[in-house]
């Protein structure tokens, strides 16, 4: 078995404008919108750390300063909580600052996910690295990223997370053509298409927001022209790597994920995520679920043809 370099760094693109959540995101980064009482971006960083990646590079943009502040110390707040003897909230405030070694670089222009990843090249160097998108949250009970890192360290190349969806959903995602391997949950990627029409999709397996990339992706991204939407697409670069020899950092593998994923990229899915997380919180679930059942019962049929 080849001796592939360990994955130690995570890259988290967080430079988007968050237009689907306006006006809330006019001055507040979408990544800082709370899932109950913790910003969505913290769950993503926690996932990286749980997978053994304590070196985290955040790709940010203008008006994203609050992300940096969140992962920094807040001495005045900490002193106030300490003076009150509020140890529980003090621990929660300090937790985000102690999670990982955080680094930041700005993406000067919104040129797409591929360009955002390319902004990490100097920090990452020639090491393999993970990419975690903030819109996708993976349940902490599902070790997706750990499994992806394991596949990378066994097979080399790059690894993407795949999830099977209904045919009418593939047009919203990057979609993969796949071949089986000797591992039930691992496939070889033979082609990738960014947001194909349903009748042109090579499969129902779409890429969700987790990647483990060989450093060769930077060389490809440097030469990748703008694609769909006029943006530099990471999918296009990975498609090139799928046809690149292994000794040049090529080969792309997919890990089939059948666990729990939460999409916070649009308002409806964001609300569903908040409800799911609140329903599972020990300090909230009993009272919240009782209220939720009453609310649903009182509003059953409201807004439907039967309820009008």
Image: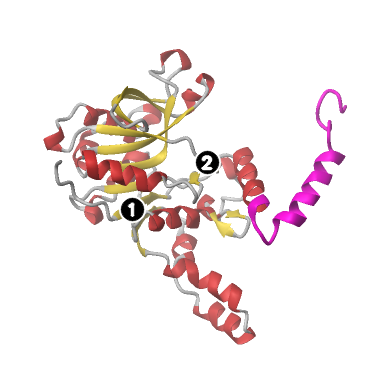
Residue furthest out toward the left: 247
At x 42% / y 70%, what residue is drawn?
98
Q: Position of residue 173 (x, y in %)?
A: 45, 29
Closer to the N terminus: mark 1 or mark 2? 1
- Rendered view: 285 above or below 303: below
Question: On screen, 206 above or below 132?
Answer: above
* Residue in the foreground of this view, choosing between 108 and 68: 68
Q: Which residues are magenta?
A: 279-308
Instruction: Give the distance between the C-alpha atoms of the residues marked 1 and 2, in whole angstroms.
Output: 21 Å
Query: In the visual, does 27 lie left or right of 11?
Result: right
- As drawn, 293 above or below 284: above
Res 233 visible: no
Q: Which dot marks residue 10?
A: 1
The tag on residue 73 is none
Write the residue at 77% across / 56% down. 287
Position in image of residue 88 (x %, y %): 60, 74
Query: Badge 1 local density, few (<14 within 10 Å), some, or many (20+)?
Result: many
Q: Is residue 253 left or right of residue 137?
A: left
- Counting from the top left corner in percent of width and height, residue 246 is at 15, 34
Neighbourhood count class around disc 2 (C-alpha, 10 Å): few under 14, some 14–19, many 20 upward: few
Q: Nearer the viewer, residue 214 or 64?
A: 214
Position of 47 relative to 72 (above/below): above
Question: Could you tell me which residue is drawn at 87 percent across and 40 percent down?
Answer: 298
Q: Secondary structure at mark 2?
A: loop
Horizontal placement of 201 versus 225: left or right? right
Q: Is residue 14 visible?
A: yes
Report if residue 175 lies within the magenta region.
Answer: no
* Numbered circle sitting on residue 260: 2
């Amino acid at each position: 078995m080849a001796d592939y370099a360990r994955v130690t760094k995570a890259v988290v693109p967080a430079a988007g404008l968050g237009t689907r959540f306006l006006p809330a995101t006019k001055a507040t980064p979408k990544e800082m919108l709370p899932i109950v009482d913790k910003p969505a971006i913290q769950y993503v960083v926690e996932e990286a750390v749980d997978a053994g990646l304590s070196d985290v590079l955040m790709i940010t943009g203008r008006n994203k300063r609050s992300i940096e502040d969140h992962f920094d110390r807040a001495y005045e707040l900490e002193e106030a909580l300490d003076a009150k003897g509020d140890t529980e909230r003090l621990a929660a405030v300090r937790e985000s600052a102690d999670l990982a070694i955080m680094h930041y670089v700005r993406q000067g222009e919104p040129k797409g996910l591929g360009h955002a990843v390319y902004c990490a090249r100097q920090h990452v160097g020639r090491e393999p690295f993970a990419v975690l998108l903030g819109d996708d949250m993976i349940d902490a009970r599902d070790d997706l990223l750990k499994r992806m890192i394991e596949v990378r360290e066994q097979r080399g190349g790059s690894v993407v997370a795949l999830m099977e969806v209904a045919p009418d959903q593939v047009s919203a995602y990057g979609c993969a053509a796949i071949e089986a391997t000797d591992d039930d949950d691992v496939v070889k990627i033979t082609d990738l298409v960014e947001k194909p029409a349903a009748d042109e999709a090579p499969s129902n397996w779409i890429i969700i927001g987790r990647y483990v990339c060989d450093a060769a992706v930077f060389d490809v991204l440097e030469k990748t022209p703008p694609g769909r939407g006029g943006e530099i697409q990471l999918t296009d670069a990975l498609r090139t790597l799928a046809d690149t020899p292994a000794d040049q950092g090529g080969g792309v593998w997919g890990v089939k994920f059948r666990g729990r994923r939460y999409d916070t990229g649009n308002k409806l899915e964001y609300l569903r995520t908040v409800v799911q997380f609140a329903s599972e919180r020990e300090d909230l679930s009993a009272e919240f679920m009782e209220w939720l059942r009453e609310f649903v019962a009182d509003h059953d049929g409201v807004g439907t043809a039967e309820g009008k």
